Amino acid sequence: MAVNICGTGSYIPSHIMDNNDIAALVDTSDEWIRERTGVERRHLVNGETTVSMACEAGRRALQYAGVSPEEVDLIIVSTISSNVILPCAACEVQNGLGAVNATCFDLSAACTGFVLAYNTAAAYLAGGVYSTALVIGSESLSNLIDWRDRGTCILFGDGAGAAVLRTDSRKMYLPVTHSDGGKGSALTLKSRHDRNVLDRSPQDRERYEGDGYFMQMDGKAVFQFAVKKVPEVIREVLEKNSVGQDEIDWFLLHQANKRIVDSVAKRLGGPIEKFPMDIQEYGNTSSASIPILLDEMNRKGLLKKGQKIVIAGFGAGLTWGASICDWM
Ligand code: ACO
């Protein structure tokens, strides 16, 4: 039994912060950020939460699929930026949508999160445990970033994307995923935050000075890991499923840095047109980046029935993985 993505949705906050706005906060420039990352602007929560964005993306995906909330029997929310520890974001989404028959849980694997959530839902569906799943990636990373650290604050943005999965009679593809906990120090975050540090009082800000309370990243190490491991895992997943690289219509990579996507495309022999990007508009939205891109492409009519798509994620943990899906 295989699975089919039968609907997508996304929610992007309307509040925009462009590179010049960031240059007013830290010692950087629009030119540096564009050249080194490809990011031009990012959308940030302004009243929204990780859960409210997840709910709206999920609602839009269900509407697209023509699936009622009551038909959903599994909801997985991939996030590292849930508003609260308990209850889990997926249960709050269930409540918001009225998906009363769903089993709900969160998954935490940072920028590989959506790929792992997709694989988890697909395995449940393929095994016959459930028949309709809603998989969501939602992040308000602006709350987790130290806006005084130019090494991280230039990269990230907020948003949510969702996909509805159903069982299908076509061929089942097996995913390939890896983790290397020994390299976890490359990307760390000690504390959960429900608001942007800039919205805190000076006294409150001091509480969170230093000591890893905001996201800390060895950018170079993550970059080198990504450009090596992502092409490797894509080759692995193609080989495992006896699918030729030329049979793939789209490679949807986690949007972390334009130079990473360019480098992966080059190492795989391109063409770059098969590696769509929207990082210029949203920055790195962690586990939301792949479903946001998927929904954008779907709504633009770029995805055609029968096309084959590779989704590939990488990030904190370290974790990385790739999966193949047939479109609709
Ligand atoms: N503006 C201006 N100058 C800067 C900035 C900035 N924002 N940041 C760093 N610099 C300076 C540095 O101080 C350094 O100056 P020096 O040469 O005088 O020492 C120079 O620019 C180069 O710095 P690098 O850190 O080497 O810059 P790099 O080209 O590596 O770009 C970046 C940094 C953009 C962070 C890059 O390493 C990157 O994108 N890494 C990958 C991050 C990623 O993919 N994360 C995904 C996972 S996220 C998750 O899982 C939640």
Image (tube, grey):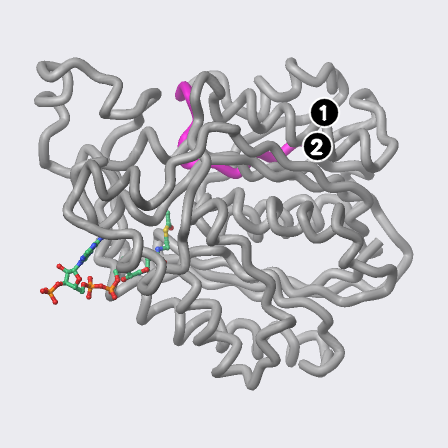
The one of 36 and 125 positioned closer to us in this rendering: 36
Looking at the rendered structure, the kind of residue marked 1 is Ala
Packing grade of label 2 (10 A; few <14, some 14-19, many >=20) is many
CA separation in Å, label 1 and label 2: 5 Å
Residue 168 screen position, x and y as percent? 87, 52
**Count of numbered labels shown in the rendering:** 2
Q: Which residues are magenta?
A: 75-85
Q: Residue at x 76, y 29 (%)?
A: 73
Q: Quadrant of the N terminus?
A: bottom right
For mark 1, what is the residue?
102
The image quadrant where one finds ligand 1 is: bottom left
Mark sitting earlier along the chain (1/2)? 2
Q: Secondary structure at mark 2?
A: strand
Extreme residue toward the right, this view: 169
- The circle on residue 299 is none
Residue type at tag 2: Leu
Decide: few, some or many residues near mark 1? Use Cα within 10 Å; few <14, some 14-19, many ≥20. Answer: many
- Contact between labelled residues 2 and 1, with CB atoms less than 8 Å apart: yes
The image shows residue 303 at horizontal and vertical percentages of 78, 58
Measured as percent of width and height from the top left, residue 216 is found at: 21, 46
Q: At x 48% / y 53%, what residue is drawn?
A: 279
- Residue at label 2? 74
Vertical order, 254 against 22 (above or below): below
Residue sitting nearer the eye, 7 or 199: 199
Please state if 265 lies on the left or on the right of 263 as rendered. right
